[in-house]
Image (cartoon, helix red, strand yellow):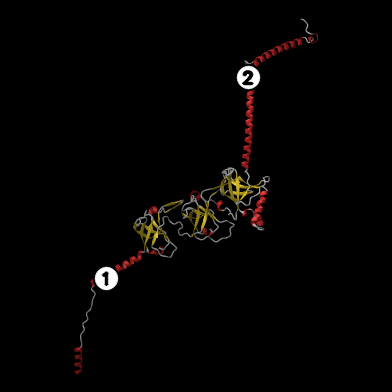
Amino acid sequence: MPDKHKSFQKVAESKIVVKKRTRLSLVWVIPIVAAAAGVWIAVTHILSRGPEITIIFHSAEGLEANKTKVKYNGLVMGVLKTISLSEDRKSIIATAQMSPDARELLVKDTKFWVVRPRISGLNVSGLSTLISGNYVGVQLGASEEKEFSFVALETPPLTGDVPGRVFTLKTSELGSLDVGVPIFFRQLQAGQVVSYELDKDGEFLNIKIFVQSPYDKYVNEDTRFWQASGIDVSLTASGIHVKTESMMSILAGGVAFETPDNDPILPPAQEGASFKLFSDRTEAFKPPVCDPHEYLLVFKQSVRGLAVGAPVQFYGITIGEVTNISTELDVKTLDGSVHVEICLDPKRYGVNFMDMAKGEDAKTFHRKMVDTLISRGMRAELDTGNLLTGSLLVSLNFYPEAPAVVLDWSQDPLQLPTVLDKLASIEDSVEILLKNLNQTVVGARGTITNADKMLESANKLIEPNSVMNSELNNMLQQGSGAARALRVLADYLERHPEALIRGKTGE
């Protein structure tokens, strides 16, 4: 018992602790869940809508906010949200909301442009927009640097995603070329003209062309480019030759390129390499002049039809060209002449000449050769290059009977002797003949005048009332009487022939 009493006493002495329980009211559950859902939806929307970019356009033509789409290879990648005028009022600023898939497209060299119906040369593009409406096209760049502000192109890029390389052609005139005209290689379309602009000095035009793969590997540092626009008609001794690249080049123009067959194998040209654009294939493949020999020709005759670039021929083979034509007036005699400067290429003289020139000093051998040729009668003259066009060329021919000439090697350039061309010689001969004929005609006129005077005197002598005419009539009458007497005598003798012996007897 005493033990039980002690235990109850301990229980009575223990303290009772009351804990307050905090409970969340069900009234707050719904707002919290709604707020969490809203945050989740907002974050999801932000992450799913993609980046926002700015595109600067030259014009807002064909663009509509919340309607004009941004497409990459036909796939919608965004839409223009706002369109506004820039502060300087020179351009249009548009913001585009892109999709999450467009993040990889937004690099520094990505290109944007407005796709609309376009006609350039024979190229027609954007016809689908007549039904679907204009949209903003995208071309992926090669850079890895991110960018969110772009300047749209005024014209769509012509190269697209086609592999190839861009080169620059330099020319003094554009001709019939335009953006989009084709580039030909062996009459196969290998690319097109991308753009053109005037250089800073204003002397040349820089034409950007794109040559697609695999044709770009055939372009090296010695490749020749020329305008292949229209029809190339040439007249030679074998007839008329007509050459064209294709019907497309006839209608819209074009550029062709080719590499000389005898060139060594060279590596392909680098991206952006520059080339000269020639006017035609003949000009492009004209052999370059190497270490030229320059000479001066003086003509005292008309050189109409001779132009800079005209060939200089030796036995019908072109060995040089005309480089300059000018007129000179002698101060003392006031006689006019035409100075024609020519340039000859020693490499075109032949293999034997090159072999002989190796054995001694080049200048000494050159002087010896020219002196020998001139002493043998070599002279320069103008010759007809084309009968239809009347073009002239310079021909080096031999005239053994030509007067001897001593060259003045102190002149620079050296003056070579000339002779009149065959046509000019004929003209001179005809002129001399006409002068002689004119003198003959003058003498004939004097003779005719004297004859007229003689006839006039004769007319005066035989006038009806003149003395001579009266005497002449008397003489005629007397002659007529004598003739009658002779006729009577003849009749009598015919009847009496014996009268010649006996005489006339009385009857």
- Label 1: how many Cα within 10 Å (few below 14, some 14–19, many 20+): few
Count of marks, rendered view: 2
Residue found at the far top of this picture: 507
- Please tell me which residue is depicted at 63% across the width and 28% down the height of the picture: 446
Q: Position of residue 2 (x, y in %)?
A: 19, 95
Between 352 and 196, the residue placed more toward the observer is: 352
Between 406 and 127, the residue placed more toward the observer is: 406
Classify 216 as above or below 444: below
Q: Earlier in the sequence, mark 1 or mark 2?
A: 1
Quarter-of-image position of residue 387: top right
Which residue bears the numbered disc 2? 460
Callout 2, which amino acid?
Answer: Lys
Name the disc covering residue 32, or none.
Answer: 1
Callout 1, which amino acid?
Answer: Ile
Helix, strand or loop under label 1: helix
- Please tell me which residue is depicted at 27% across the width and 70% down the height of the picture: 33
Helix, strand or loop under label 2: helix
Q: Position of residue 4 (x, y in %)?
A: 20, 93
